[in-house]
Amino acid sequence: MGTPITVISKKKQGVFYTPRYVAEILCDWAISARSDVVLEPSFGGCDFLEAARSKLGQLGATEEKIKLQLFGSDIDPQAFTHLGKIVSNPNGHFLERDFLKITPDSFPAGPRFNVVVGNPPYVSHHNMVDEQMQSAIQALKANNIDLDGRASLWAYFVLHSLQFLKTDGRMAWILPSSFLYVDYSRSVRRTIINNFRRTLVIHLGERLFVRDGTEEISVITLCDGYQPSRNQSGTFEVIYAPSVGEIQKRIESWAGGGSPNIRSDINSTLALLSDDAFQVFNSLVCAPGSKTLGEFCLIKIGIVSGANSFFFLNKSHWNKYGLTEDVLSFVLTRFRFSKGIQLLEKDLQEIISLDYPCILFDTSNLKVIDGPTKNYLDTFPTEKRNNITTFVRRSCSRAWHTFNDHRIPDAFFPYMHNDGPSLIMNYAKINSTNSIHRLYFKSDIHECIRKAIAISILSTFSQLSAEIEGRTYGAGVLKHEPSEAARIRLLLPTTLDEEIVNTVFQEIDQYIRQGEKDKARKLADIFIIQDFEPGVSERYQTVLAKALECTRAQRFPIKKAIRG
């Protein structure tokens, strides 16, 4: 057993344990003197405490002294069963209490600590009970620290830990990858930068908790040189390690004065780029014709049904229930159903013929509900209907089955994907579900520019920008919220020839339909860099293509069995 990471969701609750080897690596770095006093805020299976005891012993501390130097807390009684196997007389050093309700004075003699180590509970704000949320908010108020109300529990643990540290103290954490990309984490990172001389974040390719049934991406976070003044500007370095076996090497290089990527508090994917790629990418960001997707369009989520399998039907199910055209609308339910970068009427007819769910059971235009429509609505269990939050909210202003907003988008953009996004022009004039983003171009954006945008989004430059702005989930999928999609960079030629744009657009559409996405990307590259000198173009394609390949490789998990 090891120190737990708690993950709570509506579907599953689980406790996942840190591999002992990783706990040893973190303690080996964090503990530098035999007199160091160590705190583990959520000690669980005690792997960090055991690693700390071992490290202190290596530095010359006696067993009697070590007992006085280890402290911790946990709310799980089972954790104290593990504790009893390594600490015979806790002497009030280990509290069965919520860490967020503890202050340094809660421990004997109210010590400040040289070291705080561990991994905090990974509980999202959606799943925090009221008492947890109130404890979290009050803990930060005591330190005059503000945090977005959407923050997960781990963020409160990290920030609350600051008041326990001595000047020049160290923290070492295993955190979720959200530390590097979600909006609320920005304030956590900024607080760390303001309070520590330097911080190293190791984005780990190997998944630590596969054996426990999760592919959570982990980041090792080492914070050195605590200064409670909160007005310094420390370095914040982000590097990549493909496997656990590489962590020690990365730490040793950093501790020895190496400077992997000192690009303070920026997006982690951007920080992981090589110097060449970083320079080339930023030079293109500043180039004429460089824009963001959000400068051309408004990006919204698709329509929300509350029960997709009931409302989105295929042709066979539609005919089975005898539903009529007065409740019929067409909708794109899966991005992959569209094969190119334009959705045509013939594409829609093919989707229908393949019996894909693309027909929306739509009561929004009905004044009276009877016949087959009423019969179909009656097949939805009343008890189930009353327990669906979306329906409950909707029934305040309209019927539970009425949700089509009839806002037909100009184009579609994927919410989640594996191999890079594309933009699909919506010439079939249908709506989409909330698994697909809807794009509405500004009224003054000419059709030629719209097509050029669809071309540019496939370029290496924009594909890399999409990796930078998106967020990665455990299995390697890349996700874009509307605000993140809006920040994706585009590069458009300063002069657009409508005939050339139409030709390139059609050629790329055919490549995509044939599954030749690499050929489409190369053609998009040629299109967007036509204003550049040949030498610049060649450097762009070589450097950024390699960067894109590396960045995508880092998204996908390396799964190994980790012992201990």
Image: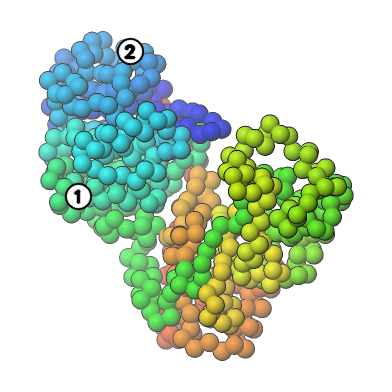
Label 2 sits on what residue type?
Lys
The foreground one among 274 and 139 is 139
Asked whether the beta carbons under mark 2 and mark 1 sit within 8 Å of each other, the answer is: no
Is residue 249 something one can see in this rendering? no
Q: Which residue is mark 2?
A: 85
Q: Is residue 311 left or right of residue 142?
A: right
Q: CA distance from mark 2 to mark 1?
A: 39 Å
Q: Is residue 263 left or right of residue 8?
A: left
Disc 2 secondary structure class? loop
Is residue 112 something one can see in this rendering? yes
> Which quadrant of the rendered structure holds the N terminus?
top left
- Say which residue appears at 12% left-offset and 20% top-offset: 109
Q: Residues within 10 Å of mark 2 (few under 14, many from 20)?
A: few
Q: Which residue is mark 1?
A: 194
- Say which residue appears at 19% left-offset and 52% top-offset: 234
* Label located before the other in sequence (2 or 1): 2
Q: Nearer the viewer, mark 2 or mark 1?
A: 1
Disc 1 secondary structure class? helix
Picture disc at residue 116 = none
x and y, in percent, of residue 372 in the image: 85, 47
x and y, in percent, of residue 282 in the image: 35, 71
The foreground one among 142 and 261 is 142
Label 1 sits on what residue type?
Asn
> Which quadrant of the rendered structure holds the C terminus?
top left
Image quarter of residue 289:
bottom left
Number of labels in the image equals 2
Q: Is residue 313 left or right of residue 174?
A: right
x and y, in percent, of residue 167 in the image: 12, 38
